[in-house]
Amino acid sequence: MRVLVILATLLLFSSCENLLFEPDMASIDVYENFDYLWNEVDRKYSYFELKQVDWNEVKVRYRSMLFGDMTDDSLFNVLKAMLLELRDDHTNLVSPFNVAIYNVELQGEPNFFSRTILEHYLNNDIYYTGPFVHGFLNNQKVGYIRYSSFMNPVAKADLDFVLSRYANTDGLILDLRQNGGGSVFIVPKILARFVEQKTTACYFKTRNGAWHNDFGPQEPFYITPHGGIRYQKPVTVLIDRGSYSATTLFAQATKALPNMVLVGDSTGGGGGLPNGGQLPNGWTYRFSVGQMVDLQGNINSEEGVPSDIPAQFDWNDLTRDEIIDRAIAEIMGKKSE
């Protein structure tokens, strides 16, 4: 399946900081590198229309900043500024001395403070199981599970233990705030514990032609029930603008699952499938070459999946986490229905 090939390539380029080369820069023309990168983006980037980016105008504006004997650092800064026009945190340029990053989490208010949770909610009843930090809340009626990054592997035994520990709760809180993403293959692995039948969560399609709106067929992304321990009571998933990439996929997938609800701010986006390559001078790059499509045919997840229940952290009182409180209220409200 083409999508799986692209997703596998994503894993390779998520560690692109290690793919650094040192060619003879004196023999490489700055215009050659600029044109190579601009053309690659022009032929393959997937969100020109959604982002309303005039890529031809961008070329004229930034190519005029080049000159023959400019330093590596100056060239990098021009290429970085050009890529930032895409407003896409899946877009990176990597050199031996710098990495271009969009930092999408800065586009929203901060909504997570770990000390508030550890000190005023979990107290000393904290478990660390694999990548999960978890404990009981609300007089042991609610389970709280923090998963900070989809870069952290999830073992079957970890999920078995955590879900067994909270089997008798009225609901779970899965905290994915400030989870910047990682391996998309972990998304269905976790969600498989919260479904009872094979479910289509969304679709993916990839850029496949010269025109900016040329795409291949949509391919479904499924969630298949795990054969062992599962949890079917209410689950609230906490998100914010720092929830990106694989976390946006996770958030989008919850829309297809009736027992899950999103609480907090919109995710940061990152619905695109990134892929990349190498410039003539050896620097590496990546950008989105595919799109996530929701069940209604929309691609807006690239700019963020909205929460079902909006909530904001109040930084004036660090003894409370209003987003957790709202999630608890949602779970207990479901019980009383």
Image (spheres, grey):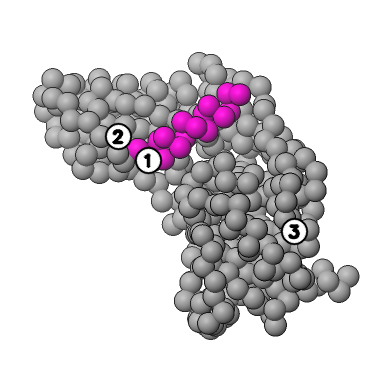
Q: Is residue 146 left or right of residue 230?
A: left
The reply, left or right, for residue 307 in relation to residue 153 is: right
Is residue 2 inside the magenta stretch?
A: yes
> Which-is-in-front pick, marks 3 and 1?
3
Please give the label number shown on residue 90: none
Q: Nearer the viewer, residue 316 or 227?
A: 227
User: SS of the residue at dot 3?
Assistant: loop
Q: Inspect the image, locate mark 1, and give the three-letter code of the amino acid beneath it.
A: Ser
Give the class, few, some or many, for how many residues have Cα within 10 Å of label 1's Cα (few <14, many ≥20): few
The residue that appears at 13% across and 20% down in the rendered structure is: 27
Q: Position of residue 107 (x, y in %)?
A: 47, 55
Q: Is residue 15 magenta?
A: yes
What is the C-alpha distance between the residues marked 3 and 1?
33 Å
Magenta-drawn segment: 1-16
Q: According to the image, label 3 marks what residue?
A: 231
Whole-number angstrom distance, CA of label 1 to CA of label 2: 8 Å
